[in-house]
Each structure stands twice: as structure tokens, then as C-alpha cells.
Image: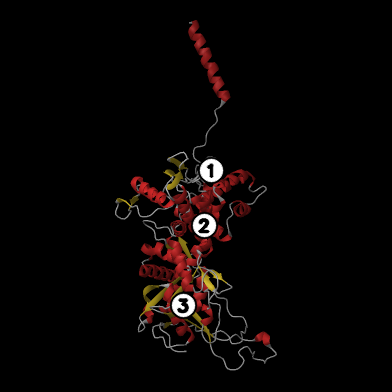
Amino acid sequence: MPKLFGFSISDKEKKSSSLLSPVPPSNEDGVDNYISSGFYGQYVDIEGVYKTEYDLMRRYREMAVHPEADAAIEDVVNEALVSDLYDSPIEIELSNVNASDKIKQKIREEFKGIKEMMDFDKKAHEVFRNWYVDGRLYYLKVIDVKKPEEGIKEIRYINPMKIKFVRKERKQKGNEMMGPQGPSDMKKAIYPEIDEYYVYTPKPNYPTTMFAAGGGRGNDKTSIRIAKDSITYVTSGLFDRNKGTCLSYLHKAIKALNQLRMIEDSLVIYRLSRAPERRIFYIDVGNLPKIKAEQYLKEVMSRYRNKLVYDASTGEVRDDRKFMSMLEDFWLPRREGGRGTEITTLPGGQNLGELADIEYFQKKLYRALSVPESRIASDGGFNLGRSSEILRDELKFSKFVGRLRKRFANMFNDMLRTQLILKNIITPEDWEQLSDHIQYDFVYDNQFAELKESELMNERLGTLATIEPYIGKYYSNEYVRRKVLRQSDSEIEEIDEQIEKEIKDGIIPDPNAVDPITGEPLPAEGDLGDVPVEPDLEQGAAITDAQLSKDTKSAEI
């Protein structure tokens, strides 16, 4: 295979040659065909919605321009990425990563550098929308080939119509599916080796130039083969498994949008043709011959008929009498013996104000795009009540947006992997262990989810207040934390450490040093304070009697 443009990152540890399988590794890139002589089979004419991926992406982009589809797409993008005035739309979360604080700090710095190279904080909405509409996203990672240890220098967006991922089977001698122990042992047959790379065409004549570049046929010099590690490739996760094509989230809405367009156009045509009231002029022609009667009718028409035409481009109103359309009046001759010249009026179309069919197809479009139907109405208010009042569609939509975020975050995973390995911060083997624990924190703006969490917390605390007198008698403290407060093992450990630290720092008082009834701090050990003395009632009574006898003697004197 000729040398590819770009760079490749290879693992130091080679996989064991004893691991044999006739099944290829699962792929999430929409390329499932393994072809020994190229990938021409990817672009056979397919009857139906589309023939090539190029046509498919053109259709997606045309759909995104439609007002209803654009409104639904904006709802999805605005929920997924929230542009805050002070915070970045996405941050990296490394609390579950088993690494030193130094490594974590370097990972955070490199992630921040990647966002700055992409200018992601400013272009987040545009990047996510392009990925959502096209169903795929390509970025070229530019490095200094003389100094690869300096990492990625620039990240450039690639139009998906100009690039294609190719997976080609290496030519084998003899029987490729023959196992190491002979033809009888087919269970241990090794799958042929696969070459993976990208084909970039600056000016694609799709798919002709792609054939030549991918399959090795022809002498097209405009196509460039790029190494796999030089490109960041993120798909939507939706695939047409029958045709091996990556799809966009707009694919399900193709039929719904076409139906909405047709019903809207037919509604406009019907209203234009049926809405106006038209008049019928019956002209008395007496006993005139047919030819003269027609001539007389035309003279009357030209005399009384006005055809005012409004030119929308110039704003002029002019008189145009050349043609007669269905929207105009009717002129009919009437012979002698009739009722003479008469003018009657035909009523306009009825039920022109009904929009039930339009609203149905709008809801169908929103359902196809996984957006709640309640968001169609522009005057719909926002309910900040209890979570029981929240529509089920909103909860489904929140989960759908969460899946989109996880899928989209694979872009940062790939760029971060390349950057960390090139700068020798970690090895490819270390990345395999760390990548599963790296998470991304998106700025959240879904009030429904916040209301749900808040209400759940209030319900749990209410249950805790009810069950608290029975702790130590019927329930243990650990049982209450696990079953009532729903705290996991890691949360319990983390909360205990935080409480201990805050008590040590004096942020919160020690619960053992506080009176549980009054909430006042207990006296220190050995300091009982002033002990209250109970009054002596007998001594008080004696003093009262003596005083009484003294007062009596004074009165007698």
C-alpha cells in the first residue's frame, strides 16, 4: 500500500496472532463492506430514497432549510448545547479517572486547547447542527511532521461531501479463510487483514473520482488518501444495515416533510382557485347569427371588463386584458326570449379555514424528529409546576438529547487521544484504560429535568423525616441512606469524607457535640457550669411565720 498523507498512531503491544476469528470487528462508521479490489460496491444504484451518500446529504441539507424542519432542529440543538454567558458549553469531568492529579491537570489543559483550536465556545451551535443534519462530521488534525511531539497545531473542518472512509481488504495468496490447522479446522479461520484510510477529493465529481481513489482504478490525481489517525470522524450512530449507509436523524422525517410540503402547496392552489367569488354575465344577443353574436359578446366584454393585475416585484397595478383565467368572471350569450341581460354571483369555496390536515402533518414531522408536539404552538406557555404535570414527551425528549450528547462527545475523545499520545502524556495502552472513565459535562438547560430531580429530593427528605424516629429500632442508618435517599456506595463514601473534612475545618458543628433537642452546643467535658439549687420550702415557710408574728406584735402595741 502506498504511503498515506498524514500520520498514524500504532500500539506498541501487538495483538496476539493466536486470536483468530472469522468475524470482523464491529464498526460504527457505516462502512460494513470489505472488498478486495476497492469499494465500488458501496455506490451501486439503489432504488428508493437515495442512490449515493452524496445525494442523501444534499437531501438532508435541503430539508434543514424548510421552516418547520428548521424549527425542530433548532429545538434539538438548543437543548443539547446551551450557550451560557460565562460558562463553556462543555467541560471535561475526570472524577472517575484513576490517574494522578498532575495527569488530570494536563488532560484538562489539552482539552481546553482543543476547544480553543476549534473555537468551540463560539461555534458550538454551528458544529453540532452540522453533525445533526449531515449525520457525520469530519475534522483534519494538522500536526508539524518534523515535531510531532508538539501535538495538534490546527483542526480544520472537512465537508462530508468531499471525503469518504474506505475499508479495503488486503490481497491474500491462496485461500484467505483457511485456518492454521488446515481446511478441516474452519472454526479458527482468521479474517483477512484490512487497510483503513480516508479519500479526500477537493472537487468531487461524486462518485466517479471516489471510485478511482478507493479502488485503485483510473488515474485521478485530485483524490488524496489520508491516514486514519489524521481524521476525526463522528457519526450519528444510525445506519441503514441493508445498504451499509450512515444516516442522519433527519432521515425518518423525509416522507413526513414531503407530505407536509405537498399538502401546503395543494391548500394554496385550492384557496386561490376557489376562494374568490365570480360573476356570470348573461348577455342578450337577440336573433344575431352565431358569428355576430360572438363578436358582440367580445365587444361587451372589452367594454366593461377590467382586469387589474398586481405586480409584486414593482408594486404596480396595471390593466391586463389579454388572458382570461379561472379566477375571472364568465360571459355567456343568451338568445331572444330569455330573461335578457342578467348578472349572477357564484359563491367562493367553503371550509377554507380548516387547517386540521396541516396540523396533522406538522405533528407527524415533529414526531419523526423526536421533538415534542407541544413545541409547535408558538403561544404555548411553559409549565413550572410539579413533575407529575410534565408531559411524557418532554421526558423522552430529554433522554434523546442525552444520547445525542454522548454520541457527539466522541469527537473530543478522538482529538484528546491524539493530543495526549503525541505529546507523550500517556501511552496508547493507558488511553484504553482511561477513555472509559472520561466524561463530559454539558451545560444543562432542561428545566423539566431539574424539576424532576428537585421533586424527587423533596419526596425523599419527607420520607426521611417520617422514618427518622424509627432509625435504630426498625431501620439502620445505612439502610435509610441506601433505600430512602438512594445513595450509592461511591456517594456514601464521598459524602462521609466531605462531612469529616468540614467538621475538622469548623464549617459545620460536630453532631456529637450538639444537643439533638435544642440544637445548642453541649458543654465541654468537666465543665458543668452553674448548678441550679432548688429552693428550701420548709425554711421559707419558717421565715414567713416569724415575720407574721412580728407584724402582729407591732400592731398590738
Name the amino acid, label 2.
Leu
Mark 1 sits on what residue? 515
Q: Is residue 313 left or right of residue 201?
A: left
User: Label 2 crowding class (10 Å Cα cut-off): few <14, some 14-19, many 20+?
Assistant: many
Q: Is residue 304 above or below residue 102?
A: above
Residue 464: where, in percent of width, then height?
59, 47
Front of the two marks 1 and 2: 2
User: Label 1 crowding class (10 Å Cα cut-off): few <14, some 14-19, many 20+?
Assistant: few
Front of the two marks 3 and 1: 3
Q: Name the mark on residue 164.
A: 3
Name the amino acid, label 1.
Asp
Query: What's the colour scheme?
Result: secondary structure
Asked whether the residues under the numbered discs 3 and 1 touch, taking CB atoms below 8 Å apart as contact, a structural biologist would say: no
Between 241 and 522, the one lying in front of the other is 241
Between 128 and 423, the one lying in front of the other is 128
Q: Name the mark on residue 365.
A: 2
Residue 199: where, in percent of width, then height?
44, 80
